[in-house]
Amino acid sequence: MNKFLLKALVLASVNIAIFADAQFRTRNRMDKLEEFDQQTFSWGFYLNGNILDYRIVLNPRYGMNGNQNLVTSKSSTSFGAGLIGKWRLNDYLDLRAEPGLQFAQRELTFNTQSNDQYAAGTLTNPPFTPFIMGEKDKVREVKSTLVDIPVMLELHGQRWYNSRPYVAAGVNYIVNLQSNSTSTDDNLQQVFRSTTHNFAWSAEMGIQFYFNKFKLTPAIRGTFIMNNEVVADNANTPPYWAAAMSTLQTRAIMFVLKFE
């Protein structure tokens, strides 16, 4: 379903761009919504499709076996929606807040059976009893519901008939409602834990198209969490999972359709 939604958003944007190009090339066509961007405050909503993945920095001891990476991630497509609040600063700058809800599911694979060699204990981990890792121990399906609150500064050019390009950048506060960060269970009980409160930066570019009743904006946005999302496993848990990762950070590419 998520892949279908992402493809539908992309196809809709292409069709809109073709239609808009044909419409806006006519030099005698009257400009639309001429006073819209003169409002001090305006609002709207957006829909988006995402491609999410993890950036992983492995622990040299528990996350690697020679040159082999023992932990890998698999990206996934997802979707989200949110609201738009815009404050006009001047003719070229706007300040935007776009709180939204994003749904994601990613897969982490831990091929860390070779960590049995550290069963006698190390300086950072006590001794542990090895066991044979089954499929349910190796693969973690990480489901996330993210409350994403980006605040972005938008720099736009002048209107060209009924279109206007822009770029934007800013910071995000992201709350993971399915982080399991306070759970007393950990990966030994098949519970993957990550941080609840996160901070990210975002960059975006797009083109605003003006119609008779609304403004439509297809855009591409990249969002990258800056803090480490790893929550350490309990002290008596073998170093097959969280100990194998030094840093775990979400990164997302979003295709956004905005309606204002």
Image: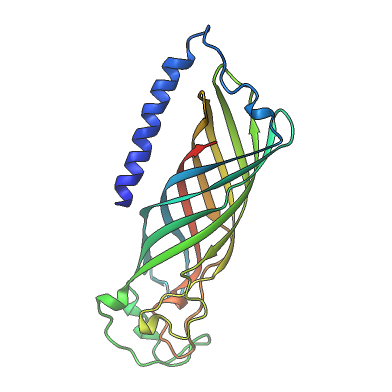
Please say if 47 is above or below 118.
above
Image coords of residue 159 (percent x, y): 61, 21
The answer to whether residue 69 is seen in the rendering is no
In this rendered view, identify the residue nearer to me: 230 or 130: 230
Q: Horizontal placement of 68 versus 196: left or right?
A: left
Please say if 35 is above or below 188.
above
- Give the residue at the far right of this rendering: 90
Question: Quarter of the image holding residue 241?
Answer: bottom left
Q: Horizontal placement of 246 versus 134: left or right?
A: right
* Count of numbered marks: 0
Image coords of residue 219 (percent x, y): 49, 37
Question: Quarter of the image holding residue 164?
Answer: top right
Who's the residue at 33% across and 89% down the image? Answer: 130
Image coords of residue 116 (percent x, y): 35, 84
The answer to whether residue 250 is seen in the rendering is yes
Q: Horizontal placement of 221 versus 68: left or right?
A: right
Who's the residue at 49% across and 56% down the image? Answer: 101
Who's the residue at 49% across and 89% down the image? Answer: 235
In this rendered view, identify the residue nearer to me: 171 or 56: 171
